[in-house]
Amino acid sequence: MPDPRFFETGPSLTVAELAARIGAEVIRGGDVVLSAVAPLASADGKALAFMADRRFAEALAVTRAGCVIVPPAMVEAAPTAAAVLSSREAQASWARASTLFHQPRHIDGVSTPDEACEDASVVLEPGVVLGEAVRIGRGTRIGANTVIGTGVQIGRDCVIGANASIAFALIGDRVKLYAGARIGEAGFGAAGSSTGPVDIPQLGRVILQDGVTIGANTCIDRGAYDDTVIGENSKIDNLCMVGHNCVLGRNVLIAAQTGLSGSVTVGDNVLFGGQAGVGDHISIGDGARVAAGGGVLSNVPAGETWSGYPARPLRQFLRETIWLSKQAGSKTRPRESEG
């Protein structure tokens, strides 16, 4: 279930009622009552899940979801204990259902400093906006014109720069966010449908653990359903992008203009040079290093240094670069004409 501090849950619907509103066909269980959406792995008997790709057939077989949406060709693979909906655009149908069950909380009201701040040591510079149910720990300073969304929790001795925005987020102690940082915006996700792409509601949070630093104008998206997590004492430079559902370990260092696609997992003590890029669902092991400009398209083992595009182990990259340079620089003597 999405965090109720950040999302409102709408009224329950039967499977039949839901099918009529999202354009799906009831296969069985039309009278089952649903009140939430969830991924296959974490769904319970009150939740709707979906499977749009055969790669997730194993997860479909063991899900505890009360109802699943599947493509017509996968109806027979659905678990017998679940209600079943059929849709040729299963993910888009699930996205439409998400908006019926869960709506993000907006800043419809504001907290006063007395309500939001732990004590008088909290400093709010001019123009700060505090949504309802915001909590700010002692010794924290919030910069001018920063907006703190409904339900956000900020720890002690933090420094938040001017013109930042924070929403759908839980922030630890001694965290620094520099000017213009965007924490908790919706992750980038869309599902194809007959009427064009459908936005997939982003129902997760951002968690910044103790001692994290986030640079100016860096964006960290909230999770699609699970959380985006930045581990203790990790430092992210200016103009970086961390996609939804990324999980970073402790003491990670990320230089400017680096981008992590969705669902990237990064171990402890990993280093990224400037303008590095990482594809979605990639895993990077403890102590690994990605050189500046590296484009990571496959998993990086712990302790290794990778470079280039596509990124590969550093020695391999250097050997290939030297060989290519020699080939490009070599000159073949033209054959002398006979006669």
Image (tube, rainbow, N blue to C red):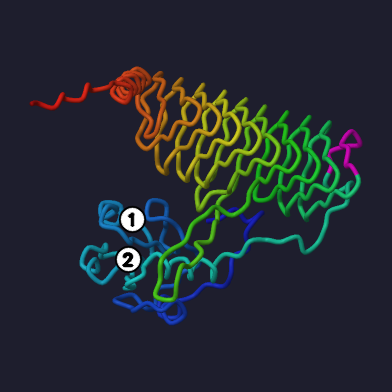
Residue 297 picture quarter: top left
Q: Residue at x 68, y 61 (%)?
A: 105
Who is closer to the viewer here, 247 or 242?
242
Majority secondary structure in the magenta region: loop
Residue 255 lies left or right of residue 171; in this view the side is: left
Indicate the amino acid at tag 2: Ala
Q: Secondary structure at mark 2?
A: loop
- Residue 106 in picture, x, y percent from top left: 71, 61
Q: Which residue lies under the disc numbered 2?
A: 82
Q: Residue at x 81, y 51 (%)?
A: 130
Q: Residue at x 79, y 36 (%)?
A: 137
Residue 14 picture quarter: bottom left
Q: Is residue 123 magenta?
A: yes
Indicate the amino acid at tag 1: Thr
Callout 1: few (<14), some (14-19), or many (20+) C-alpha neighbours within 10 Å? Answer: many
- Residue 274 in picture, x, y percent from top left: 56, 30
Marked residue nearer the N-terminal end (2 or 1)? 1
Q: What is the span of residues highlighted in magenta in the rendered image? A: 117-125
Q: Secondary structure at mark 1?
A: loop
Callout 2: few (<14), some (14-19), or many (20+) C-alpha neighbours within 10 Å? Answer: some
Residue 51 lies left or right of residue 339; in this view the side is: right
Query: From what the image shows, is residue 173 above or below residue 45?
Result: above
Residue 62 lies left or right of residue 243; in this view the side is: left
Q: Quadrant of the C terminus?
A: top left
> Which disc number belongs to residue 63?
1
